[in-house]
Structure formats: C-alpha cells, structure tokens
Image (cartoon, grey):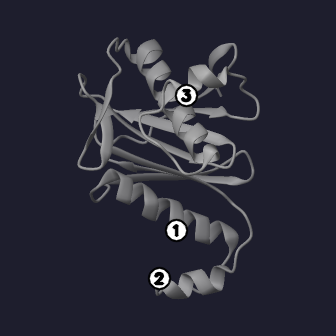
Amino acid sequence: MKIFYLDINEYSADMDFLKSFADRKFLSEKKEMQHCYGRFLVKTAAKEFYKIEDTQIEIVNSKPRFKNSELNFSISHSNNIVMAAFDENPIGLDIEFMKERNFKEIFERYNYKGKNISKDVFYKFWTEYEAAIKLQGSPKTKITFSFKDNFMVTVAGNFDENYKIYEFSNTGFSCV
C-alpha cells in the first residue's frame, strides 16, 4: 500500500489548471479546491507510480475508481492536507485535523462506552469509522496513526501492514 499527500499551503499550482480536475460543482470554493487537489494527486500518483495512462475516474456505488484499471484508491482531505491511499484491494482512507471539540457530547451520540474521552481517542474512533464507510465493507486491516502532529489518519481494507508515505511538492514525489 502507498499513501500520498500534499499540503495545499505549500504546493503552488495554477488555479485554472487545478479546476480542470473538477468533475462536479461545489457550494464552497474551499471544498472544490480540495476536491481538485485530490483528483490531481490521485491521477499524478497513478501515472508516476503505477504507470496508468488513462486515469479517467468514474463513480461506482458512490465510490470513485479508475474507469480502465483495477487499482483501488481512496481520497481524503482535511484542513490543508489532501491524501490518497492506493492498494490492489478495496481501501478506505480518512484524515482529520485534530481540533478541540466537546468530545464527551460527541461520544454520547455514538453510545461510546469507554472511559477515556480524549482528543486522540475521539479522532482515532472517528477516522476508523469514516475509513470503514469509504471502504464500504468490514476491514480486515486498519492502520491508524498521527500525522504532522495535528492530524489523525486511518486506512482500512484488506492489505498487509507495510506501507510507504510520499509527499508531493512542486519538485515531485519524495518518500517521507
């Protein structure tokens, strides 16, 4: 499994070029740009790492996939980070910026029975929940980790636990 990310605040791109990756309309310009960055990241990684020439994306059962490839991917974005995970098996990814919230109130809505109600516990719970939804099934494997001090990430699917993370910048991809 490979995970790719880019930091919107550190990557400079021509906005008209990025908007060429839009395949639907959004009410918020911020959401539209995150979507475009996500599509751009997925298509660029697919071409460079997996040698997929036709990166046309279609939506099947509410999940994006390549129209002409069996490679699976999942995209997530939060705050300034856009992330995508790839695997030969179905995969779900979620990233969340860990801001302060009323964690006790949120946990009560989900009938959480644990005693520890902390920011880390909440975001681990939430990213695992969201990644499983994006997977559209029960994961056999989940990897959850802190990212850049203030993000939580979970990848869910059926994969071995070996993974690499690559950052995309204006100079290309680099393994972190």
Q: Position of residue 28 (x, y in %)?
A: 60, 50
Give the answer, above or below, for where 52 lies relative to 117. Answer: above
The residue beneath circle 1 is 125
Quadrant of the image containing the N terminus: top left
Question: Which quadrant holds the C terminus?
Answer: top right
Q: What residue type is labelled 3?
A: Lys
Callout 2, which amino acid? Answer: Tyr
Q: Which of 58 and 76 is in front in this view?
A: 58
Question: Marks 3 and 2: CB-CB under 8 Å?
Answer: no
Q: Which of marks 3 and 1 is in front?
A: 3
Residue at image coords 69%, 43%: 80
Callout 2: SS: loop
Task: Give x and y (percent) for residue 33.
Answer: 60, 38
Query: Marks 3 and 2: which is nearer the front?
Result: 3
Q: Earlier in the sequence, mark 3 or mark 1?
A: 3
First in sequence, mark 3 or 2: give its number.
3
Cα distance between the residues tagged 3 and 1 = 33 Å
Query: On the picture, is 163 further left or further right than 60?
Result: right
Query: Mark number for residue 110?
Result: 2
> Where, by quadrant of the figure, is residue 162 drawn?
top left
Label located before the other in sequence (2 or 1): 2
Asked if 121 appears above or below 133 in the picture, the reply is: below
Residue 112 in sight here: no
Q: In this view, does 66 lie to the left or right of 102?
A: left
What is the three-letter code of the residue carrying label 1? Phe
Q: Residue tagged by mark 3?
A: 19
State whether residue 111 appears in this view: yes
Give me the C-alpha separation between circle 3 and circle 2.
Answer: 37 Å
Assess whether mark 1 and mark 2 are in contact (beta carbons under 8 angstroms). Answer: yes
The residue drawn where x is 60% and y is 71% is: 122
